[in-house]
Image (cartoon, rainbow, N blue to C red):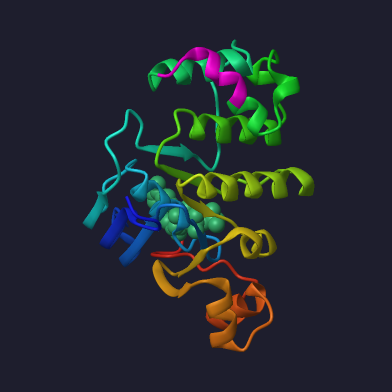
Amino acid sequence: MTDHETVLEATGIDHDYGTVSVLQDVSATVRRGTVTTLIGPNGSGKTTLIRALAGLHEPTRGEVTYHGPQTARRIGYLPQHPAFRPGFTCLETLEFYASLVGIDRKAAAAYLEQVGLADATDRPVEALSGGMTRLLGIAQATIGDPPVVVLDEPGSGLDPGMSAHVFDVAADLADDGIAVLLSSHDLELVERVADRVLVLSDGRIVERGSTATLEAEYGADSLWSVYESVIEGDLDTVRVQGEHA
Ligand SMILES: Nc1ncnc2c1ncn2[C@@H]1O[C@H](COP(=O)(O)OP(=O)(O)OP(=O)(O)O)[C@@H](O)[C@H]1O
């Protein structure tokens, strides 16, 4: 593969939940060696798009295509609310995932270290804090070195230092050639690591490009400023798609 080759691609996807249309005609690529970030207001469809790209649900229309190498594990995924089966330690949990993806169980400890959980190796998963559970989720998403890693709000619930750390981990994964897609509301951290930014609003990608390109285009000095310009209307109201319930 050449650098920055497309590994995962959504083409013209729509997603409906019943009669509610949540994504409309979304096309996007996730590229090797690149951090692609998805930003947008609450309810704009980020998780729905991420789950479609990760192969967890079929889009209603359109296609998601994987172009990467044939590996035991193609896509690692961190859900927005990671949860693990109680009764096992962090290490046992990761060893289980290692065996699922066909790698040596002994490799599991290194993935815990990578996310800063080396001291929690023997802690039962039910005794982890919310942030630690998310970190274990990130370790789980990266085990087996899948060519694509998809992280739904990896910094959510983490303290500022750990949040910055997991974004740096995402950047390191991209430096190692992995195609990383992450969603986040933390625009400062997005600005720090993003090679490409996709802005989703009301189920459509309304802007895309590198931070530098977007800032130049909007005459803005920060991604937040770009965001304010791109997202029209009230920034303090959740726009609920479909019928109001
Ligand atoms: N299972 C579901 N059934 C019906 N509607 C759903 C379902 N999941 C999500 N939705 C709706 O789809 C829309 C998009 O939700 P989604 O979770 O994809 O947004 P998001 O951008 O990830 O939001 P947030 O930033 O708040 O996490 C919302 O209006 C939400 O209420």
Is 43 located above or below residue 212 in the figure? above
In this picture, residue 157 sits left or right of residue 39: right
Q: Nearer the viewer, residue 35 or 175?
A: 175
Residue 29, image quadrant: bottom left
Asked if the stretch drawn in magenta spans residue 74, the answer is: no
Percent across and percent down for residue 164 are 71, 50
Determine the residue positioned at 62% across, 61% down.
190
Determine the residue positioned at 44% across, 28% down.
144
Determine the residue positioned at 39% across, 22% down.
101
Q: Is residue 91 visible?
A: yes
Percent across and percent down for residue 12 are 25, 65
Percent across and percent down for residue 193 are 61, 58
Determine the residue positioned at 51% across, 49% down.
174
Is 74 located above or below residue 234 in the figure? above
In this picture, residue 94 sits left or right of residue 21: right
Q: Is residue 159 visible?
A: no
In this picture, residue 48 sits left or right of residue 220: left
Characterize the magenta stretch by its predominant secondary structure.
helix
Q: Residue furthest bottom?
A: 219
Residue 69, image quadrant: top left
Which segment did they paint magenta?
A: 103-110
Number of numbered callouts drawn = 0
Is 16 located above or below residue 122 in the figure? below
Percent across and percent down for residue 52 are 34, 49
In this picture, residue 165 sits left or right of residue 65: right
